[in-house]
Every structure is written in structure tokens, then in C-alpha cells.
């Protein structure tokens, strides 16, 4: 009997090699994604001291460009750069920036009241909101200001929208990814041809749009924006998964999971990307989860689409479609069969086992991160010293004339002010007068005894010192090379009135000590301090800026030696006078030059214009001498205008001179007279110094005269500390020449 013939076996197709299914480039990308995951996880569970606000978009509005810019620069100068701050004109513009998503917070400064308002975006994470509130509150406290905190209103929800937005992103992305995996389990990793690949992508994407839209509507409030966003996120996650799988097979599926995880950790843990450094901040917002979270918060808060975030999502979607289109050609070049592993039962089982083995642990890791990582705490703001606080009012009795001023100058003094020189003054709109002093002797028990500068406030009844918390210079020293700090000596001051407050500008010379003797110092140039003085309240230092680079040598003009506000309305100018000395072998006095600038632009030297003899030049070097150094003015002086006539009051030939001298002109640009001596002030006995006469034209005004003061001091410091009254201004009334 002839045995029945056996049907010949069909040879099994050869399985692609592991190198084909997971080429080195894919393995490298997969390893990189896993490394990013681990780094994110480390940031998510490490201690709070590593988490600080960084470059948080913010706006500030003060209704005053000078105040707004000064506050912005103060925040920008904080360690770690917690804010990316810009100024806007009005509080409404600041609120709109937050409500439109352009900023995470707005700082609303009310210059005529000692309080600010912090306006927070409603979709910021609690950790970020708490961190920025701490920072802003500490700045406000250091300025002696209160802080009110408000959160912008929402249209569709109340409370923290973060959890619902994160849930929406995770569920929609998992929906899209899950649909792609199901298609892979049913039909194999790779479509048989390009047309089927595109059809598979469209089919999976359509299902993702429907299911994702439903998820978005349920989790984000049921608005059209929420529905559209949910569908788009699910479709993008599905298309990206299909594309990577079509290009790299099972390794591409792993790469999709790892890429999602690498960018999803901050979403899952609630770790705001503005609390971490680069590149993590950019990475957190560039992936599908990060961009989706931004869009989801906007949909939850404002019921509208975040076009910037949607653009990032659409880039992922377009890239996925392009990958599907080119994947067939890419696999053909590597000779990988399109669906070999799915043509037999064994191949399909092997493929499904690979999918489950890859997806299950990574998905478990995602769930673990979301469930096990605790809510993050952020390091608190560093404490800042108080910049200004007014001491108690010390009664002075009635002050009606120069004799009363000298009587006050002979009083015992207080711990905050025992003695000082300079004594430039300006009248505030509330009737008080601000006095600025140079090296000031305070109570030695609070420090070294001397500080570089101080301020007194006087009115008809009392005198007050304005001091930082714990004492010290009102305008803080700047750190210098080799531990040699740079201090600030006031020269002149001017008030620019505003509604409800004043801007008090103080020009100072920055000085660096070079030895132990009285004259062992070098002048480095001009600095300007700006104080906001609400009516009846404490001056607040909001800005202190060095103008120009440090440069030594008296031959360079010291701008700000005198400063005067002239004009009215929009036609007001600040005239800034500078003094220079060519060297004592040529002259003991100082020459005088002038520049002008609009009041709001004083801190911007590029806007200054210098008188060159015939017009106003943008070049400092073109500034022309108005008064020559020979028999010239002192290094610091007063220039003021009265009834159309300009006066420069100073001591001729600085320390070697003996006369208060007044130069006159019809305009600040001259020509100036040769100067007339109006009062003799020889140095007194026992090495007493009398120097730096300054005018106070608003103080007890009388026609044809002006109140002036000059500083008194001793070459023997011990005599000053024993009797600080030797180190105080003396007041006189002098005649003004015709």
C-alpha cells in the first residue's frame, strides 16, 4: 500500500534580527528618554531647597514709569532670577496680561499708599503661587509696604484647576496611546503598505478624537474648547505612537511610551516647570503633556483655546503624520518585512507578548509617579533687610527762622543722628522737608558709629530720622574689590511731585576708602537714589543706580554736584551740573558744566544732553565749561532759579577758600558772572573745618536773600565723637547779588 503523500511544509518567514527591530539609534533614543525620566523623577522627589521660582513671566504697574521701572529692576535683580518682569502703564493692562495668560502674576503698586497688590493667574500651581507670593511679600516688607493677594477670576471653574487639567491630559493621552496599542495587538506592528498605514493612522486618530473629546468635556467643564482640546490631545498621542511604531516596530512603541513619560513627570506630579532650571523648563512645556497642560488650564479657566500651546501640539501631530508617510521607505531600506511577525499565530503571539512586556512596566511606573510622589514644597524667600523706617518724632519747638535752625542743630541729637555733613534739602508736597547727609555719626553701640549717609525729616513740630532696620546707611554700600566697600555721599536732591506722593531724587557720589585718614578716599562717579514718599508717610528707597562705570580722577566731571528742576507741565527739565578739577597744580577750585534731561529719564544717561556752548549735544565730552576751575566752585554746590535769575552758591576754591560766593546768570547755560562773595566763613580754631555751603531757596524765603548752610567738622575725630555738635551744619542768611 502506497503511503499517502504529505503536503509540503511552507517555510516560515525568517524573523527580523533584533538589530533591525531596535537599531542603535533607537536604542540610544530610548536610553536618553529613560535618562530624562530618571532625572525628572529625581527632581520630583528631591528636597524642596532645590525648587525656586525661575523666570516666571510677570508684569508690574505703578501708574508711574519711574516707579514701575524701578520696581521691575529690583525684582529682576533678585538672586536666582525668579521673575521675568516687565512694566506696563496701567493696572488694567497688568490684570489683562494675567487673565490672557501672558503673565503668571502682576504686581500692582500704589505709590501714594503703603500697599501693593499681587494678582495671580488662577491656573498656576499652588506651589508656584505660594513661592511667588513669598518672594513678593518679602520685597514689600523690606520696603515697609503691605501686600494684598488676589487671584484672577475664572469663567468655568473655581479653586485650583491644576488637578482637573492634569487628569484631562493624562486620560486623553492614555486614550490615544491605548487605541494605538490595541490596533498594534490586532493588526501587527506595521501596516502592509503606505496606504494602509495612513488609513490605520486615520482610523485610530478618528477614534481618539471621539473618545478624547468626551474625556476633555467631562474633565474640563464641557465647553467646546475642552472637547476640541481633548480630541486633539488623544489624536496626537495616538498618531505619535502609530508613527514611531511604524518606523521602528516594537522599539518604536517603547520609544513612544518613554518619550511620553520623559515629558509627563511634571504633569503627573504637579511639579510646575517654572520651579526648575533649564533645560527642564523648556522640556516640560515642549512635549505633548506639557503643552496639553497649558492648553487644558486655559480651557478650564477661560473656556477658550491657548493658541501657543495648541501650536506645539499640532507640531507633534504633523510630525507624526510625516513619519507614517516615510516609514515604509525607511523600513524597506533596512529590508524589514512589513508585517512578518503577524502572519502566523506564533508571530502574533510573540509580538503581543513583546507589547505587554514593554507597556506594562512603563505604565506601572507612570501610575507610581502620579500616586506615590507627595505634593511638592518650595523653599521660602530669603529674608531681606528693611530699607526704611521712621523713628519717633522728636519735638523741636517752633521753627520760624535761621536762629531756630541753629538752635535745633545744637540739640543733643538721637542715636540715629548725632552729627553729619552736607545737609542738602528739598521741600515735600505735604510740608515736610527732607535733609540728606553724608558721613553720619550714629550711636556707636549699633555699629562702627559712622555710616555713609542718612536722612532726616522735619516739619513745624518735630524732627525724625529715617533709618534702615538695624541702623546703617540709608542708601546701602556696594561691595567692592578686595573687601573695600563703596559708599554713597549725597550731593544734591530734588522733588518731582506726583498726585498723592513725591519722587525724591538724590544724586550721590560713590566713594571708595583708600586709607585711614580723613581724605583717604577716591570718587568713582555719580549714583542716583530714588525714594517714593507718600503724603505724610515714610520715604521708601525704590532704586539706587550707578550712572556710568567707575572712574577715578578729579579731572572727570562729577555729575549731580547740583541738580535743579525748572519749567512746568510737560516742559520740565532737570538740569544736572557737573564739577571737575584739573589738578591742584593748576587750580584749587572746580569747573562747572551742565546737562539736562527730562525728570523721568534721569536714570538713563543715554537721554542726557550736554551744553556744548551753542546747543545740546549727546556727547558728554562736548560739555563746555561754564565756570572755570581757577577760583572756581566747590566740588558740591547749589544751583537754583528765582524770578528768572539763576544762582550758583558755593565756596570759592573749595577748602582753601574762605567765602561763600554766588555766581549769577540769566539761564542755566550762562554766561555766568565771575562770582560775588556774600559771606566769609574762615575755618575756626582748633583745626575746625567749615566747608560745602549749600542753598535752601524754599526755606523761609525772603526777597533778595536765601538761607544757606555750611558743614562744620574737626580734623580730630575724637573731638567729634566727644561732642557731635561740632559736626553739624550751621545756617546763615545771605544776600543775593543783582
Image: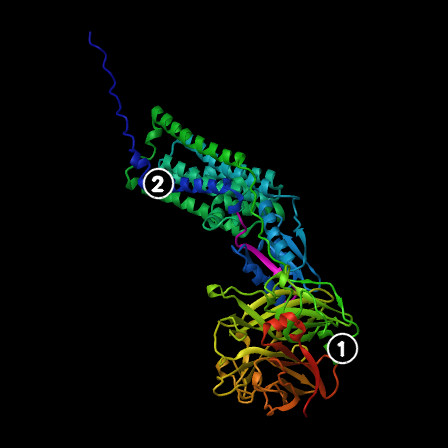
Q: Is residue 59 magenta?
A: yes
Which label's residue is closer to the chain start, 2 or 1? 2
Residue at the spot of label 1: 404
Residue at the spot of label 2: 26
Disc 2 to disc 1, C-alpha distance:
88 Å
- The quarter of the image holding the C terminus is bottom right
Q: Is residue 658 left or right of residue 699?
A: left
Disc 2, disc 1: CB below 8 Å? no
Q: What is the x, y in percent for residue 302?
A: 62, 49
Q: What is the x, y in percent for residue 239?
A: 45, 41
Q: How dense is the environment of label 2, judged by Cα within 10 Å: few (below 14), some, or many (20 and up)? A: some
Q: Is residue 563 magenta?
A: no
- The quarter of the image holding the N terminus is top left
**Quarter-of-image position of residue 70:** bottom right
**Residue found at the far top of this picture:** 1
Q: What is the x, y in percent for residue 707?
A: 70, 82
Give residue 420's mark: none
**Residue found at the far left of this picture:** 2
Residue at 48% x, 74% y: name it: 551
Residue at 49% x, 63% y: name it: 483
Rendered image coloring scheme: rainbow
In the displayed structure, would residue 334 be above or below residue 570?
above
In this view of the protein, can residue 464 be seen by the observer? yes
Q: Nearer the viewer, mark 2 or mark 1?
A: 1
Q: Is residue 287 left or right of residue 90?
A: left
Q: Nearer the viewer, residue 167 or 143?
A: 143
Q: Tag 2, which secondary structure?
A: helix
Q: Nearer the viewer, residue 712 or 25?
A: 712
In the displayed structure, would residue 219 be above or below residue 138?
above
Q: Which residues are magenta?
A: 51-64
Q: What is the x, y in percent for residue 360?
A: 44, 30
Tally the numbered discs. Answer: 2
Amino acid at each position: 500500500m502506497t503511503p499517502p503523500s504529505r503536503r509540503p511544509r511552507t517555510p516560515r518567514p525568517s524573523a527580523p534580527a533584533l538589530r533591525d527591530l531596535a537599531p542603535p539609534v533607537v536604542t540610544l533614543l530610548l536610553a536618553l528618554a529613560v535618562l530624562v525620566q530618571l532625572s525628572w523623577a529625581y527632581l520630583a522627589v528631591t528636597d524642596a531647597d532645590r525648587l525656586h521660582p525661575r523666570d516666571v513671566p510677570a508684569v508690574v504697574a505703578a501708574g508711574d514709569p519711574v516707579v514701575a521701572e524701578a520696581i521691575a529692576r529690583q525684582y529682576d535683580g533678585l538672586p536666582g532670577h525668579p521673575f521675568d518682569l516687565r512694566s506696563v502703564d496701567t493696572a488694567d493692562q497688568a490684570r489683562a496680561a494675567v487673565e490672557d495668560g501672558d503673565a503668571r502674576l502682576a504686581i500692582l503698586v500704589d505709590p501714594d499708599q503703603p500697599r501693593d497688590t499681587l494678582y495671580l493667574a488662577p491656573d498656576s500651581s499652588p506651589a508656584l503661587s505660594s513661592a511667588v507670593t513669598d518672594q513678593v511679600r518679602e520685597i514689600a516688607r523690606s520696603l515697609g509696604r503691605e501686600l494684598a493677594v488676589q487671584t484672577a477670576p475664572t469663567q468655568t471653574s473655581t479653586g485650583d484647576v491644576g488637578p482637573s487639567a492634569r487628569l484631562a491630559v493624562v486620560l486623553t493621552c492614555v486614550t490615544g496611546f491605548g487605541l494605538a496599542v490595541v490596533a498594534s495587538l490586532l493588526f501587527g506592528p506595521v501596516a502592509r503598505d503606505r496606504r494602509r498605514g495612513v488609513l490605520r493612522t486615520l482610523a485610530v486618530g478618528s477614534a481618539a478624537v471621539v473618545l478624547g473629546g468626551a474625556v476633555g468635556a467631562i474633565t474640563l467643564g464641557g465647553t467646546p474648547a475642552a472637547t476640541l482640546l481633548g480630541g486633539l490631545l488623544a489624536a496626537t498621542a495616538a498618531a505619535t505612537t502609530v508613527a514611531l511604531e511604524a518606523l521602528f516596530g516594537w522599539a518604536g512603541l517603547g520609544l513612544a511610551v518613554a518619550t511620553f513619560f520623559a515629558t509627563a513627570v511634571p504633569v503627573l506630579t504637579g511639579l510646575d516647570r517654572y520651579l526648575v532650571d533649564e533645560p527642564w523648563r523648556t522640556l516640560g512645556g515642549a512635549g505633548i503633556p506639557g503643552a496639553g497642560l497649558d492648553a487644558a488650564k486655559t480651557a478650564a479657566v477661560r473656556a477658550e483655546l491657548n493658541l501657543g500651546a495648541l501650536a506645539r501640539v499640532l507640531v507633534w501631530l504633523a510630525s507624526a503624520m510625516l513619519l507614517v508617510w516615510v516609514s515604509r521607505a525607511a523600513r524597506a531600506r533596512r529590508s524589514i518585512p512589513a508585517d512578518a511577525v503577524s502572519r502566523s499565530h506564533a508571530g502574533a503571539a510573540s509580538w503581543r507578548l513583546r507589547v505587554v512586556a514593554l507597556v506594562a512596566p512603563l505604565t506601572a511606573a507612570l501610575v507610581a509617579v502620579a500616586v506615590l510622589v507627595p505634593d511638592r514644597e518650595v523653599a521660602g524667600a530669603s529674608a531681606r533687610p528693611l530699607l526704611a523706617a521712621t523713628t519717633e518724632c522728636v519735638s523741636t519747638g517752633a521753627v520760624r527762622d535761621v536762629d531756630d535752625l541753629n538752635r535745633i542743630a545744637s540739640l543733643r541729637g538721637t542715636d540715629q543722628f548725632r552729627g553729619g555733613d552736607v545737609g542738602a534739602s528739598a521741600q515735600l508736597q505735604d510740608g515736610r522737608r527732607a535733609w540728606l547727609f553724608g558721613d553720619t555719626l550714629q550711636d556707636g553701640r549699633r555699629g562702627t558709629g559712622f555710616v555713609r549717609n542718612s536722612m532726616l525729616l522735619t516739619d513745624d513740630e518735630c524732627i525724625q530720622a529715617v533709618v534702615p532696620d538695624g541702623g546703617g546707611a540709608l542708601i546701602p554700600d556696594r561691595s567692592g574689590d578686595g573687601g573695600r566697600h563703596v559708599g554713597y555721599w549725597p550731593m544734591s536732591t530734588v522733588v518731582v511731585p506726583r498726585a498723592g506722593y513725591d519722587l525724591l531724587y538724590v544724586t550721590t557720589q560713590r566713594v571708595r576708602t583708600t586709607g585711614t585718614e580723613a581724605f583717604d578716599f577716591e570718587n568713582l562717579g555719580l549714583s542716583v537714589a530714588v525714594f517714593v514718599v507718600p503724603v505724610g508717610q515714610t520715604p521708601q528707597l525704590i532704586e539706587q543706580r550707578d550712572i556710568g562705570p567707575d572712574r577715578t580722577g578729579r579731572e572727570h566731571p562729577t555729575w549731580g554736584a547740583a541738580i535743579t528742576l525748572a519749567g512746568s507741565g510737560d516742559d520740565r527739565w532737570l538740569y544736572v551740573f557737573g564739577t571737575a578739577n584739573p589738578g591742584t597744580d593748576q587750580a584749587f577750585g572746580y569747573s562747572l558744566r551742565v546737562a539736562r534731561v527730562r525728570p523721568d529719564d534721569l536714570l538713563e544717561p543715554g537721554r542726557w544732553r550736554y551744553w556744548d556752548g551753542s546747543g545740546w549735544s549727546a556727547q558728554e565730552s562736548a560739555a563746555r565749561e561754564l565756570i572755570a576751575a581757577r577760583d572756581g566752585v566747590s566740588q558740591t554746590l547749589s544751583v537754583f532759579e528765582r524770578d528768572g535769575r539763576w544762582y550758583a552758591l558755593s565756596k570759592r576754591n573749595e577748602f582753601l577758600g574762605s567765602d561763600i560766593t554766588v555766581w549769577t546768570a540769566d539761564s542755566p547755560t550762562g554766561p555766568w558772572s565771575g562770582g560775588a562773595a556774600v559771606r566769609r566763613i574762615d575755618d575756626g580754631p582748633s583745626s575746625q573745618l567749615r566747608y560745602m555751603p549749600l542753598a535752601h531757596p524754599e526755606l523761609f524765603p525772603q526777597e533778595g536773600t536765601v538761607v544757606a548752610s555750611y558743614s562744620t567738622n574737626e580734623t580730630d575725630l575724637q573731638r567729634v565723637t566727644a561732642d557731635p555738635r561740632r559736626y553739624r551744619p550751621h545756617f546763615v542768611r545771605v544776600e543775593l547779588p543783582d
